Image (cartoon, rainbow, N blue to C red):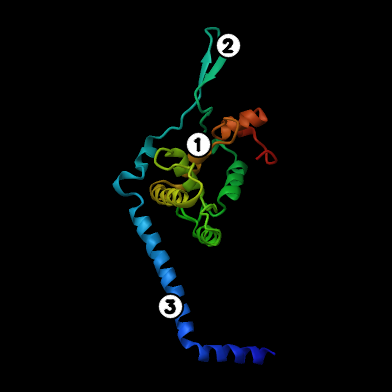
Amino acid sequence: MPQSKSKKKDSFRKRHPTLIRALVLGVIFTGALGFGILYASWALICRSGACPSIEVLDEYTPKQTSKLYAVDGRFIAELGLEKRTLVKLSEIPLTVQNAFVVTEDKRFYSHSGIDWRRVFGAAFKDVISMSFTEGFSTITMQLAGNVFPESIDRRERRGIGALTRKLKEAKVARAIEARYDKKKILELYLNQISLGNGAFGVETASQRYFGKSIRDVNISEA
């Protein structure tokens, strides 16, 4: 049986050499065209100031909540659209840091802003579904979208708008990685991220969900 199938394949190739060559050339052409479009998009995505300048991160401080107290010291209210209390990376338990890395971006410490293995896997699924909805954002790409919402609209979830957003995130992420070390990036991310119910950053989320500082969170809570 295997020999019979092999003979049939050889026979098909001999009888249709032009078709075989056309198919091969078609695959090569399609791949080259796709690569060309992607390269051109990458080169032009940040033209005319379409992408933000990452130098602002040198002095960047996420919005924090202002606490209002009475004259006698009694707490009255928190003011601000984003409830957030900043903490240094050294104050965040390593178990919490690792939990985010494993969940969001397990190759965070080995890539330069873009996880190409995830990119190619997501691209394959997107081509099959023609949706451009498969996620491949790294921690650094998420940071780019969170810090620069005016330039990188993360509400774009489908089609060309989503692809454009991803390209912007990726390009800005590469620039961030070239300028800052992993500790700085992770600290910014953990203070910037939205964790639901109006809680921004791990310290505020810890206070809201566990009733204590992130410094005191244990392994099971992380």
Give coordinates of residue 62: x percent, y percent: 46, 32
Residue in front for this viewpoint, 101 or 151? 151
Mark with earlier residue (1, 3):
3
Mark 1 / mark 2, whichever is N-terminal? 2
Q: Separation of disc 2 and disc 3 at Cα?
A: 76 Å
Where residue 19 sits: x, y (%)? 48, 83
Q: Residue at x 42, y 50 (%)?
A: 164
Q: Relative to 102, does residue 217 appear above or below in the rendering? A: above
For disc 2, the marked residue is 74
Residue drawn at 55 percent across, 7 percent down: 72
Amino acid at dot 1: Gln
Q: Is residue 75 visible?
A: yes
Note whether 78 is above or below 91 in the view shown. Answer: above
Residue hosting label 1:
192
Dot 2 falls on a residue whose secondary structure is loop
Disc 1 element: helix
Q: Is residue 41 above or below residue 218?
A: below
Instruction: Classify the position of the C terminus by image quarter.
Output: top right
Q: Pick the quarter of the image with the N terminus.
A: bottom right
Q: Position of residue 90 (x, y in %)?
A: 53, 38
Q: Residues within 10 Å of mark 2 (few under 14, many from 20)?
A: few
Q: Amino acid at mark 2?
A: Arg
Q: Which mark is residue 25?
A: 3
Of tags 1 and 3, the one toward the viewer is 3
- Gap between marks 1 and 2, in whole Å? 28 Å
